Image (cartoon, grey):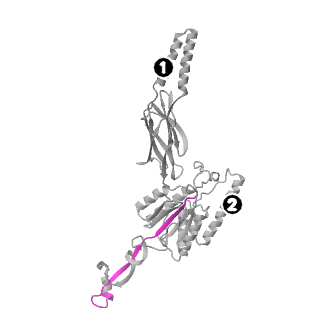
Amino acid sequence: MIQARETMSAPLRWRRTPVLALALAGAVLSAGLGLLFGRPDVIALGLPLALAAVWALLRPPVAPSVDLALTLEADASEDSSVAGTIEAATAAEWIQLAVDQGGERTGEAETGPADPIRTRTRLLHSGPGEALAVTARAMHHDGLWMSEPTPRLRAMWNAAPVVRRIAGLPVSPRLSGLHGAHEGVRPGSGGDFRDIHPFAPGDELRRVDWRATARLARRPGDLLVRRTNALSESSAVIVLDTADDLGEVAATWGQGASARSGVTSLDLGREAALSLAAAAVDGGDRVAFHALAPGGRSVRGGSGSRHLERLRGVIASTGVSGDGSRYRRTPPMPPGSIVFVLSTFFDGAAADLALRWRASGHAVVAIDVLPVPRADRLTAAQGLAMRTLLLERAGMFADLRGAGIDVVAWSADAGIQLRIAARRALRDRGRGGRR
């Protein structure tokens, strides 16, 4: 199934190549040598070169443009790869293509105007990224004419992160609605037994408990109904900080060298966000998502498989905020939600919001998505700067824990720690949840 397609029609600006001058020079040299030594056969050798050069001068190429198309689709053979197709259509004889895959130049190819080129790009990171790009130039008359390179055409791909299974999340401090998967405190349907109550307007006749009526009714005509608790929904909010994207190789911080950075913080952040969303949806809960960036995307609370697919697309398209400016608007939070704040916590903005939400009565869990940094290839000054940043971050974690916010480092076995931390956050709120 086609996931992305980019097209471009670029005008061709033709110019003569040095091959034309070499052909003329070869014809003149051959004729001169033939006349000098009296060799007609040598003169005849230069005749094709002269005719080809004259033909190229008298018949310049008439191809006005080239149409390029890039098509991307998921690779069925490997989840971490994208299959691509490059198509070029022009009236020129052939096309030279410079192909970039994953932001890196991978090679050049020559093809006819009607011959597509198949590519396969291995994705190193999740999220939005350049999967395929191409620059083309046309050739005519056996290379005697060449066009200027076309503008670079690129196709972006939003790679969804992997989902790690989390056994379950506790319910939020306050349940909402009359439909869900958790035992509520209001009377309704679907839950456990609540009490025996006199029949009142609005009660259904099928809920009449005839045994209790026969045993406990005081007057003829009195009916007693069996009431149950309603099943309600829990609300979880996932907040992803996109202020920076730091890899496990500390030497690449601030350079944007994604090919050498290893696993990055946003790789782990997107993985944690989608894993939390999948666990919440599997439990019948409502889940919302917010990207902490100016103009960052948000998804309102919802539940169900269609809502999970919507979250998957939004999380996969969430990248690092470009300008690095601090967000100013606090995302809306449903009352009594569990808030998962995913950040590297180098910038104090995410910690400030977590403290604010904790003070307003929400259960908050801070999830550290910074990979374990590798200090190799760092100078002494850079190593000192990294240790200073990590010490400042440790002090921020101490402030969060002092306010009753657990800090969990996201890893392969983070599900158990996350479950314990969320339960502790609810217990501090005065109510424990069970799944």
Tell me which amino acid carries mark 1: Leu
Q: Is residue 143 left or right of residue 391?
A: left
Q: Is residue 179 left or right of residue 292?
A: left
Instruction: Please rate how many residues cluster around mark 2, counting C-alpha atoms within 10 Å: few if below 14, some from 14 to 19, many from 20.
Output: few
Q: Is residue 342 left or right of residue 299?
A: right
Q: Is residue 274 above or below residue 187?
A: above
Q: Is residue 87 above or below residue 51?
A: below
On the image, which quarter does residue 180 sit in? Answer: bottom left
- Residue behind mark 1: 51
State the mark number for residue 173. none
- Residue behind mark 2: 388
- Could you tell me how far apart the alpha carbons at marks 1 and 2 are, in whole angstroms? 73 Å
Q: How many marks?
A: 2
Instruction: Please tell me which of labels 1 and 2 falls first in the chain.
Output: 1
Q: Residue at x 55, y 17 (%)?
A: 28
Q: Secondary structure at mark 2?
A: helix
On the image, which quarter does residue 397 sit in? Answer: bottom right
Residue closer to the observer: 218 or 214: 218
On the image, which quarter does residue 350 sit in? Answer: bottom right
Residue closer to the observer: 391 or 254: 254
Mark 1 near mark 2, Cβ–Cβ under 8 Å? no
Q: Position of residue 230 (x, y in %)?
A: 39, 75
- Residue farthest toward the front in the current orientation of the protein: 58
Q: Is residue 201 above or below residue 87?
A: below
Q: Position of residue 127 (x, y in %)?
A: 51, 53
Q: Secondary structure at mark 1?
A: helix
Q: Position of residue 134 (x, y in %)?
A: 50, 41
Q: Is residue 319 above or below residue 86?
A: below
Residue 362 lies within the magenta run: no
Give the magenta range.
Answer: 214-243
Q: Is residue 386 visible?
A: yes
- Residue farthest toward the left in the current orientation of the protein: 221
